[in-house]
Image: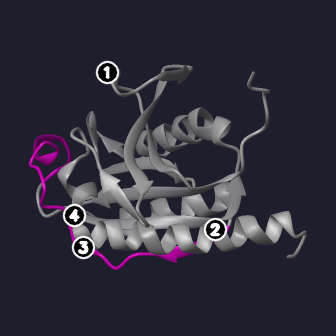
Amino acid sequence: MSRPALPEPVKMISSIFSGIRDILNETITALSEEFGEIDYISALAPFEYTDYYAKESGTSLVRRFISFETLVSPDTLPDIKLFTNKVEDKFTKEGSRLVNIDPGYISRAHLILATGKAYTHRPYIREGIYADLTLIFTKHTFRSLEWTYPDYSDGNTIAMFNNIRERYAIQVQRLKNNQP
């Protein structure tokens, strides 16, 4: 019989993209003020995998990935998504989002994104938020699934998430050893 146990804390990550760099920077600041110190921030990269957001957010979108120093409980994911929705609302003009924030977390086993959109691989959590199983960690690397977005399947993106996961594994080990 399985016995309920609390899960390990997880490493919060986020994808942020916008066509306006100042808004991108203000968004990163807002997230840092809410969730704590950022321990990784990617270089600016063009968001070119889809034109899905062009009508709403414009073209020439750029993206950054970030991760946070403080580990969190995985059950806080809906709260995180609801907060990031508020930040997106702050940067909405005439009904169009000027920034898109996709929060999630990395654990030892997978990368989960938060979404408000239901689908077969997205179990419901609470308050209108679903968990999107985006990548799984197996054979020493993250691997994409048949539904993984192409930008998350990209080799460079997976390498970045592998590096963030390595940092996370060190943090978890330190917690287990009661080290700062």
Q: Nearer the viewer, mark 4 or mark 2?
A: 2
Dot label at residue 154: 4
> Which circle's residue, 3 or 2, is located before the other in the chain?
3
Q: Is residue 69 above or below residue 2?
A: below
Q: Count residues near mark 1 (Cα–Cα under 10 Å), then give few for <14, some for 14-19, many for 20+.
A: few
The residue depicted at 58 percent of the width and 39 percent of the height is 77
* Mark 1–mark 4 CB contact (< 8 Å): no
The residue that label 2 is drawn on is: 169
Q: Identify which amino acid the numbered label 4 is placed on.
A: Asp
Q: Of the residues shown, which amino acid type is indicated by label 3?
A: Ala
Residue 120's disc number = 1
Which tag, 3 or 4, sits closer to the chain's start?
3
Task: Give the spatial CA distance, label 1 vs label 2.
Answer: 30 Å
Residue of label 3 = 45
Answer left or right for 42 relative to 33.
Answer: left
Q: Is residue 55 above or below residue 117?
A: below
Residue type, label 2? Ala
Closer to the N terminus: mark 1 or mark 4? 1
- Look at 11% across and 57% down and name the residue there: 59
Point out the stretch of residues depicted in magenta. 37-58
Q: How many marks?
A: 4
At numbered mark 1, what does the secondary structure look like: helix, strand or loop? loop
Left or right for 23, reference 35? left
